[in-house]
Image (cartoon, rainbow, N blue to C red):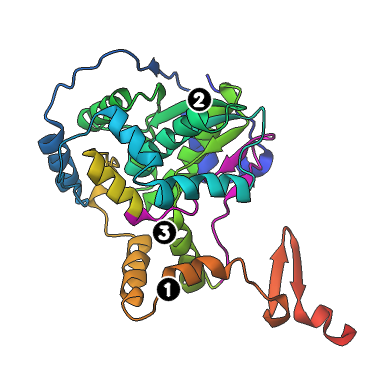
Amino acid sequence: MFSGILTQNTLRNSASYLIIAIMNTDFKNINISGDFESTFNRETSHAGIAAEAGCEVFTLEKPRQALDKIERSIITKYRKKIWSKFTAAIGEYELIQPGDKVAVAISGGKDSLIMAKLFQELKNHGRDNFELEFISMDPGFNRENRDLLEEHCNYLGIPVKIFDRNIFEVLDRSAKDSPCFLCAKMRRGVLYSITQELGCNKLALGHHFDDVVETVLLNVLCSGRFQTMMPKLKSKNFPGLELIRPLYSIKEEDILAFIDSSGLSPMNCGCSVAAKKRSSKRHEIKVLIKNLGASIQDVDKSIFNSSKNVFLDSVIAWKAGEEQSSFLDRYDLD
């Protein structure tokens, strides 16, 4: 049973009640090691799953490469676009400190798989002053997606621990119309709890450059506020835990190129709840950014860098923590 610390504030929202219900159920802890022989054709099976869910399908252009070749490509072929940006983000944002124990969250998708391999490369060829745990939470995948997750982790040499949580079933009953936001909160809470159970002080998630850019525009266009996705943040409900995003500066197109050249077919959409829902606002923003890029050079970089170049002298109001400030507060002081 999990023993995550939840504050009274957390208990006030519906997501927390659902998290507690899920955390109070038994889970199955699976350590994947040794040889694992896939029981299905990974290409055709995954394509069928994704098509049924209405998701974009990964079309394999090349056969799956040998593990040593995949690992070598990270620090050779993709050194500039992936490896260097990964290590640079860790240094620039101080994501890892000596003595840290990092829980690397693996969803089975392309981003989390490459993040796991990057951490292994960092551990083996860069710095060895921190510990790693590879964790995955099964929120209710169908059998094919679960097999796909296990098969990829085994092939890539990722010693993942899988924790069963039936989040999809709870969401299907409780949030049928708009499950995505609630699902994200629930999954984050469960991952924090697993991280704490394993004695880790940091949880690494696979959000990348494009996620950051999309988040900025989502907040501006849909919420009327300027707010970015931070490279790291402290958990408010799990004292002592931090969330880190080491793929922060890596573009999605470069991750896709790595996946394609490696011949991998990662899970693209494992959600059985949102499979029949309409496309999300995030997807609409992604399309918008792509269209803007056709006429504005490096528009994605400009959006990304805007959060690093905020001039408070040209801002009407801003908020830091619970404190609200206005330009009028110091207007007559100049």
Q: Which mark is residue 133?
A: 2
- Numbered disc total: 3
Q: CA distance from mark 2 to mark 3?
A: 26 Å
Quarter occupied by residue 16: top right
Q: Position of residue 258 (x, y in %)?
A: 30, 45
Q: Specify the segment rendered in magenta.
A: 225-253
| The disc label shown at residue 210, or none | 3
Q: Which residue is mark 1?
A: 299
Q: CA distance from mark 1 to mark 2?
A: 37 Å
Query: Helix, strand or loop at disc 2?
Result: strand
Q: Categorize mark 2 by other alpha carbons within 10 Å: few (<14), some (14-19), many (20+).
A: some
Residue 39 visible in the snapshot: yes
In reply to whether residue 237 is colored magenta, the answer given is yes
- Which residue occupies 13% across, 37% down? 43
Q: Main secondary structure of the magenta part?
A: loop
Q: Is residue 241 magenta?
A: yes
Type of the residue with mark 2: Glu
Foreground pick, 121 / 276 = 121
